[in-house]
Image (cartoon, grey):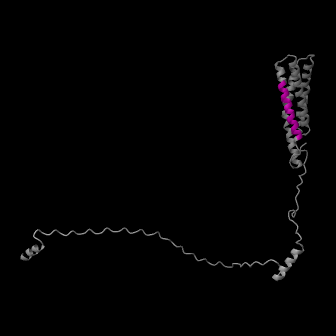
């Protein structure tokens, strides 16, 4: 028997009652079928297997009718009765189908008995699991073991006489209460001093080398006249 989640008894009873009441329609269907075929379709005979099948239909139909009516009340234990009746009817259907097959009678009724055997046994097993799968009450919560807060803290160790003497010597040399050198006090900043911006040096790219200018073209002296420069000047003076 399994325990469910930690729920209240009122919610548990409401869920179980709803589950049982939903079983009323499921039990009324086989009740109508079994009663109809049990009292109308099976002929009277002295064959043991036929008599077993006939009485299973009649008794099973009445049982399922009572289960359908009792399911409306919401009584929880109706489910286990429904499961047992369904499994018993399924076993009888399978047994009669096997007997008729062994006798060489492979008719439609034999095949139907084999199919109904599987249906009734499957429905009974599901109802059986529903009955035993529901929690039976409000379970107690699982105890949670909380370790003590100082379980991971190691106890202080005894430094020993040698270490104690060394610490005392450092204390006397320091003149204070602690053998360890004191740290410099941290100066509290009460006001924010503006920080001057650091000038950024811009490195200019190197200037391109000057392109040497072309020398001016040299003037070619005019060719002297055929009579010479002196004769030309003389002619000018005569004029």
In this rendering, is residue 168 above or below 142?
A: below
Residue 54: where, in percent of width, then height?
A: 90, 22
Q: Position of residue 61 (x, y in %)?
A: 89, 27
From the viewer's perspective, is 85 left or right of 235?
right
Tell which of 235 and 29 is nearer to you.
235
Above or below residue 43? Residue 88 is: below
Q: In which quarter of the image is residue 91?
A: top right
Magenta stretch in the rendered image: 114-132
* Residue sitting farthest toward the left: 238
Q: Main secondary structure of the magenta part?
A: helix
Say which quadrant the N terminus sits in.
top right
Residue 43 found in image quarter = top right
Query: Does the magenta run of residues contain 196?
Result: no
Residue 140 percent location from the top left of the image: 90, 51
* Residue 64 appears in the picture as rendered: no
- Name the side, left or right, on which 138 lies relative to 206: right
Residue at horizontal 85 percent and vertical 44 percent from the top:
15
The image shows residue 24, relative to residue 12, as above or below, that is: above
Query: Which of the 4 image quadrants contains residue 225?
Result: bottom left
Picture residue at 87% right of the left edge, 41% below the top: 133
Say which of 205 and 188 sits in front: 205
Q: Is residue 237 visible?
A: yes
Q: Which residue is drawn at 84% across and 28% down?
A: 118
Q: Magenta stretch: residue 118 in it?
A: yes
């Amino acid at each position: 028997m399994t325990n469910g989640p930690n729920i209240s008894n009122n919610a548990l009873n409401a869920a179980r009652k709803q589950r049982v009441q939903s079983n009323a329609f499921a039990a009324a269907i086989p009740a109508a079928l079994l009663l109809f075929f049990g009292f109308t379709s099976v002929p009277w005979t002295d064959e043991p297997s036929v008599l077993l099948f006939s009485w299973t239909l009649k008794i099973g139909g009445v049982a399922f009718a009572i289960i359908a009516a009792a399911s409306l009340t919401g009584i929880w234990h109706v489910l286990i009765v429904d499961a047992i009746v369904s499994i018993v009817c399924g076993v009888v259907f399978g047994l009669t189908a096997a007997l008729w097959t062994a006798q060489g009678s492979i008719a439609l009724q034999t095949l139907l008995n084999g199919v109904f055997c599987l249906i009734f046994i499957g429905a009974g097993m599901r109802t059986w699991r529903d009955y035993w799968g529901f929690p039976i009450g409000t379970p107690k919560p699982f105890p949670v073991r909380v370790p003590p807060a100082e379980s991971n803290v190691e106890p202080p160790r005894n430094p020993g006489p040698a270490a104690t003497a060394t610490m005392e010597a450092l204390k006397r040399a320091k003149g204070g209460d602690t053998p360890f050198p004191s740290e410099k006090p941290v100066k509290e900043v009460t006001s924010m001093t503006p920080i001057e911006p650091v000038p950024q040096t811009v490195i200019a790219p190197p200037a391109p080398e000057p392109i040497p200018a072309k020398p001016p073209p040299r003037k070619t002296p005019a060719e002297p006249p055929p009579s010479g420069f002196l004769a030309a000047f003389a002619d000018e003076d005569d004029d």
